[in-house]
């Protein structure tokens, strides 16, 4: 099931800048990519000829990155060592300014690193560098102190447990208690086989294997899964559970009932980090007031999209909105002129902006909402695919003009989308002569195409400050924070 187009748009518009706190096992995900052309003479194993190395966020840091890319304002607490990997992880997190990272520096343990070796896009080997002992009493005190400070500015708490030592049962219990004292809901991605370690959590998000280990069930039927989940809710005082079922989708279980959400058809390429995307979207949905089934449906969409990507990936709003069933599309030039004529007869002010809007992200949403405040009707000039290729390169756009137009046209504050093939929207501006012309803050007023036309007609031209850290190019390159 796919939520209605309006519901999905409401989801992303409401989520923007909402505060979330993520605590858990942060890690650096390193990818060594190359080619295999022969076997080793020393042993029957392939020889990987290294081409490049890339690094990105993993574990709890990837949960935070998922939320930040969707538009939330995220605070993150986790352990890092006093080492190069810790510095690299800090740099990777800093690539997303919407994440405020408060690391607990541990001089006696290394930063957790997962190194994956790939050939032709396929994983050959994974090597983990880690220490999984629990925190010292001093480190625990620092983490709890920092968490209580950051809870003052969050509306939901996510605990991302990868069993690397950050979230001992005692710390988890204290975090749950502290959050509930401030009426903050707690969502936990569990790793412990003893779900009592998460007693009192609002939501638990195990996969089927984790649920089986925790309950001892061997039956894979949906009925058995629901029964086992409900048993854990009762014995561990947990309100809700979302069980991910791989190819069978996911199931939500609460005291009120259960709902099975079938998996969406998709091509599975890499499941790395899919659970991080699921808990991020689930938490985002609950944060803005969706019920557990609605939030899980959105998480299900996200899971189907992220497993088609390589490596520990995340999403932007435009990827999910492209799955909606909105009924608005681009207008022709004549249709737009006709609409503008009617709006002007009604005394309404016409606004205009333009761009490629490839993979609509939080920065786009920010600019478009600001543009809409200047006018009664907002028209968006959208670069057609041929125009985007000239501006961005042969591998762009990622989304077709039809998809990009539909995503924009169904935003509630956009009244018309018109495609143009040219490098600039000058012809559209000459045709519409808008009352307000706006662009992002990377443009000076004098550099905005059509500014002279609008100003000569007595209109207003404005440059809107950008939302730092958001761009499609940055998003596409984020999984390769550092290369050599």
Image (tube, rainbow, N blue to C red):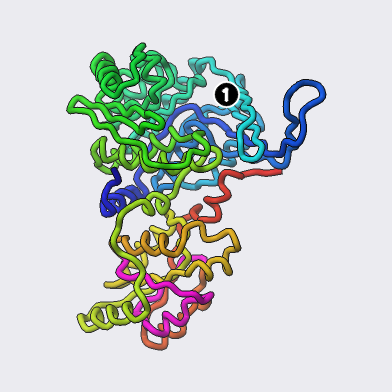
**Residue 222 sits in quarter:** top left
Residue drawn at (45%, 46%), measured in percent from left and top? Answer: 315
Residue ranking furthest to the right:
41
Vertical order, 162 against 91 (above or below):
above
Q: Which residue is mark 1?
A: 106
The span shown in magenta is 414-442
- Residue 186 position within the rendered picture, expressed as x and y whole percent measured from the top left: 32, 29
- Residue 280 position within the rendered picture, expressed as x and y whole percent measured from the top left: 39, 38
Can residue 111 be seen here? yes
- Of residue 255 and residue 371, the one placed in the foreground of this image is 255
- In the shown orientation, is residue 132 left or right of residue 281? right
- In the shown orientation, is residue 395 left or right of residue 358? right
Can residue 237 be seen here? no
Vertical order, 348 against 89 (above or below):
below
Vertical order, 465 against 313 (above or below):
below
- In the shown orientation, is residue 285 left or right of residue 60? left
């Amino acid at each position: 099931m796919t939520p209605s187009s309006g519901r999905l748009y409401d989801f992303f518009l409401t989520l923007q800048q909402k505060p979330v706190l993520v605590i858990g096992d942060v890690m650096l995900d390193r990818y060594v990519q190359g080619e295999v052309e022969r076997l080793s003479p020393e042993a029957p194993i392939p020889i990987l000829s290294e081409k490049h190395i890339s690094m990105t966020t993993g574990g709890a840091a990837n949960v935070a990155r998922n939320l930040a890319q969707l538009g939330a304002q995220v605070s993150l607490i986790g352990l890092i060592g006093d080492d190069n990997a810790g510095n690299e992880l800090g740099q990777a997190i800093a690539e997303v300014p919407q994440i405020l990272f408060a690391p607990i520096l541990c001089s006696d343990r290394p930063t957790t690193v997962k190194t994956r070796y790939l050939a032709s896009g396929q994983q050959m080997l994974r090597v983990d560098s880690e220490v999984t002992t629990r925190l010292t009493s001093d480190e625990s005190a620092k983490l709890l102190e920092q968490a209580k400070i950051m809870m003052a500015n969050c509306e939901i708490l996510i605990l991302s447990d990868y069993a690397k030592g950050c979230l001992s049962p005692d710390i988890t219990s204290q975090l749950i208690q502290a959050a509930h004292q401030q009426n903050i809901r707690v969502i936990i991605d569990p790793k412990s086989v003893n779900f009592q370690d998460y007693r009192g959590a609002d939501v638990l998000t195990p996969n089927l294997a984790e649920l089986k280990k925790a309950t001892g069930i061997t039956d894979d039927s949906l009925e058995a899964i629901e029964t086992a989940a409900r048993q854990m809710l009762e014995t561990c005082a947990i309100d809700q559970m979302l069980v991910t079922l791989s190819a069978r989708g996911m199931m939500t279980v609460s005291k009120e009932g259960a709902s099975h959400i079938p998996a969406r058809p998709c091509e599975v390429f890499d499941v790395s980090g899919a659970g991080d995307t699921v808990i991020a979207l689930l938490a985002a949905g609950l944060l803005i007031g969706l019920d557990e089934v609605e939030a899980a449906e959105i998480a299900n969409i996200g899971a189907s999209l992220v497993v088609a990507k390589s490596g520990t990936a995340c999403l932007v709003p435009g990827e999910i909105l492209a799955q909606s069933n909105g009924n608005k599309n681009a207008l022709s030039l004549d249709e737009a002129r006709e609409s503008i004529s009617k709006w002007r007869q009604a005394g309404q002010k016409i606004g205009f902006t333009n761009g490629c809007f490839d993979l609509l992200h939080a920065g786009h949403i920010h600019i478009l909402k600001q543009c809409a405040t200047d006018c009664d009707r907002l028209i968006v000039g959208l670069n057609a695919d041929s125009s985007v290729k000239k501006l961005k390169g042969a591998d762009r756009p990622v989304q077709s003009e039809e998809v990009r137009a539909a995503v924009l046209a169904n935003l509630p504050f956009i009244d018309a989308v018109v495609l143009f093939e040219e490098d600039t929207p000058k012809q559209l501006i000459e045709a519409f002569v808008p009352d307000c012309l706006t662009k992002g803050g990377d443009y000076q007023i004098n550099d905005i195409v059509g500014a002279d036309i609008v100003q000569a007609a007595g209109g207003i031209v404005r440059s809107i400050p950008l939302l730092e850290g958001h761009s499609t190019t940055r998003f596409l390159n984020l999984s390769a924070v550092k290369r050599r």
